[in-house]
């Protein structure tokens, strides 16, 4: 059931019932124009980068999947820009999209946590998601495995590896990389778009990342985030990232300031327990024989908790074998923070679920993955603007105490689907003019069709649209 509208009513009343003004206010808070200039976004042939970016950010809130859809919708009057202004920005290989996202996320932290306090459960979270596409001609697109659908389905698209930060209250995306997996058939690869780029350009570097393994990129993103000043106590990952190399590298960042908590597979990997090397299944069998099973009434979990030497990490780690209610298999978790008991470990690890919620909301609410441009630079810009918009809405949700971003979006979506207020006013104004003009025409003084085709009529309409429509989404240089 949808949450009561009363709480949201107050927000809309204070913001003129307009999501446009909400986004404007958040952009001003973030000093978005300054952020764009700081990272090196250049002016695009007469139009402010911020104005172009404002409209790109607003597309999902208008329920539009592309720039082309904007010019076919009822929102086409909000700007005099042509499509090329957007395409030049999206397809520009020099644009530093990564730095822009990092700086927006950094500004988010400065606004919500000016004292730079670090919460106990503050954590970096890494995960990937299927970023499906429908066009085989898209640059670097490939067959990707969807572990949810299993072997039954082969998607075309990218794997989106994302790094986010949970600061104790909110999840915000910090960085991402798009990855190719299994190459398309040769006859399809020949049809794929292929753009020549300066090897030193940002676009060329992002394209090169497509063929780098995800663990390597994940570690690069972590180090980059720490270098930019983001703080956390833990790195939370699933079993896919639980390699020895990943664990040891993370522990080496900032002299061991980050601990890893991850799920583990019960595979061939060996653990040293009381001087004996054994894999997870052998270790579980040994612990059962020793009668060291415990029970957590709070979580209704049976478990074994043991400290072992994980060869190759250079330090001891704590393993947790857990059997949850109504499940036959034992789950295995690892923590490099040996001070955590089972309940504490599970509470911290449960924070990892916030990135799953983020992926769901970004796809369902903000049109993540809907870009069909063949240019890989445009794919990067699409994901970046989606993540920036999510950060803006997360900030607005946080300062207004919305429980979920979805709850906020459900309300603003209905408002955005309608004609904006200026267009409705113009329709009303036009009807009133019709009444006046018909009355004049009946008196024989003026012909109604002649007046509608006159420069005076067009002037009134342009004046009206310029006063309301053009300022509904942004107000020139005052937008951010």
Image (spheres, rainbow, N blue to C red):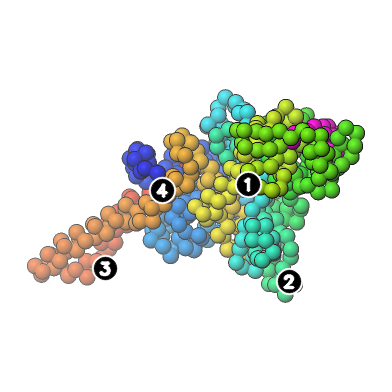
Crowdedness near tag 1: few (<14), some (14–19) or many (≥20) residues, C-alpha within 10 Å: few
Return the residue found at the far bottom. Answer: 187
Residue under pointer 2: 185
Question: Reading the chain from its start, which is encountered first: label 1 or label 4?
Answer: 4
CA separation, marks 1 and 4? 29 Å
On the rendered structure, is 111 left or right of 428?
A: right
Question: Reading the chain from its start, which is encountered first: label 4 or label 2?
Answer: 4
Determine the residue positioned at 72% across, 44% down. Answer: 330
Residue under pointer 4: 1
Say which quarter of the image contains residue 116. top right
Q: Indicate the secondary structure of the residue bearing disc 1.
A: loop
Residue 326: mark: 1
Report if residue 175 is visible in the image: no
Residue under pointer 3: 453
Question: Reading the chain from its start, which is encountered first: label 2 or label 3?
Answer: 2
Question: Reading the chain from its start, which is encountered first: label 4 or label 3?
Answer: 4
Query: Relative to residue 200, is residue 145 depicted above or below?
Result: below
Q: For the magenta stretch, what is the residue range? A: 304-316
Crowdedness near tag 3: few (<14), some (14–19) or many (≥20) residues, C-alpha within 10 Å: few
Q: Indicate the secondary structure of the residue bearing disc 2.
A: loop
């Amino acid at each position: 059931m949808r949450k009561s509208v009363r709480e949201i009513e107050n927000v809309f009343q204070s913001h003129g019932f307009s999501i446009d003004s909400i986004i404007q206010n958040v952009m001003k808070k973030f000093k978005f124009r300054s952020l764009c200039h700081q990272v090196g976004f250049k002016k695009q042939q007469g139009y402010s980068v911020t104005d172009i970016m404002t409209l790109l950010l607003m597309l999902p809130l208008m329920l539009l999947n592309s720039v082309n859809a904007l010019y076919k919708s009822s929102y086409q009057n909000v700007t005099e820009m042509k499509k090329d202004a957007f395409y030049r920005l999206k397809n520009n290989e020099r644009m530093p999209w990564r730095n822009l996202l990092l700086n927006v996320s950094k500004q988010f932290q400065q606004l919500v946590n000016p004292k730079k306090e670090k919460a106990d459960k503050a954590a970096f979270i890494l995960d990937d998601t299927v970023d499906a596409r429908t066009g085989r001609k898209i640059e670097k697109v490939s067959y990707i495995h969807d572990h949810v659908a299993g072997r039954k389905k082969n998607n075309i698209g990218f794997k989106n590896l994302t790094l986010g930060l949970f600061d104790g209250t909110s999840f915000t995306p910090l960085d991402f990389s798009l990855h190719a997996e299994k190459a398309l058939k040769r006859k399809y690869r020949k049809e794929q778009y292929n753009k020549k780029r300066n090897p030193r350009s940002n676009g060329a570097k992002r394209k090169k990342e497509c063929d780098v393994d995800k663990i390597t990129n994940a570690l690069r993103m972590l180090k980059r985030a720490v270098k930019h000043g983001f703080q956390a106590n833990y790195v939370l990952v699933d079993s896919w990232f639980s390699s020895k190399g990943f664990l040891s590298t993370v522990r080496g960042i900032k002299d061991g300031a980050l601990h890893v908590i991850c799920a583990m597979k019960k595979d061939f990997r060996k653990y040293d327990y009381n001087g004996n090397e054994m894999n997870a299944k052998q270790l579980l069998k040994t612990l059962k024989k020793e009668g060291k099973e415990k029970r957590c009434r709070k979580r209704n979990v049976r478990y074994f908790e043991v400290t072992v030497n994980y060869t190759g990490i250079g330090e001891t780690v704590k393993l947790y074998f857990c059997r949850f209610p109504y499940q036959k298999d034992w789950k295995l978790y690892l923590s490099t923070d040996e001070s955590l008991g089972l309940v504490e470990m599970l509470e911290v690890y449960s924070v990892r679920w916030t990135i799953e919620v983020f992926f769901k909301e970004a796809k369902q609410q903000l049109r993540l993955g809907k870009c069909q441009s063949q240019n890989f630079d445009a794919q990067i810009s699409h994901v970046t603007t989606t993540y920036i918009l999510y950060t803006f809405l997360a900030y607005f949700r946080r300062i207004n105490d919305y429980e979920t971003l979805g709850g906020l979006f459900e309300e603003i979506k209905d408002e955005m689907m309608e004609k904006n207020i200026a267009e409705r006013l113009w329709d009303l104004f036009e009807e009133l003019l019709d009444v006046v003009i018909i009355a004049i025409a009946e008196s024989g003084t003026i012909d109604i069709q002649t007046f509608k085709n006159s420069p005076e009529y067009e002037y009134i309409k342009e004046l009206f649209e310029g006063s309301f429509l053009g300022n509904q989404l942004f107000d020139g240089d005052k937008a951010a």
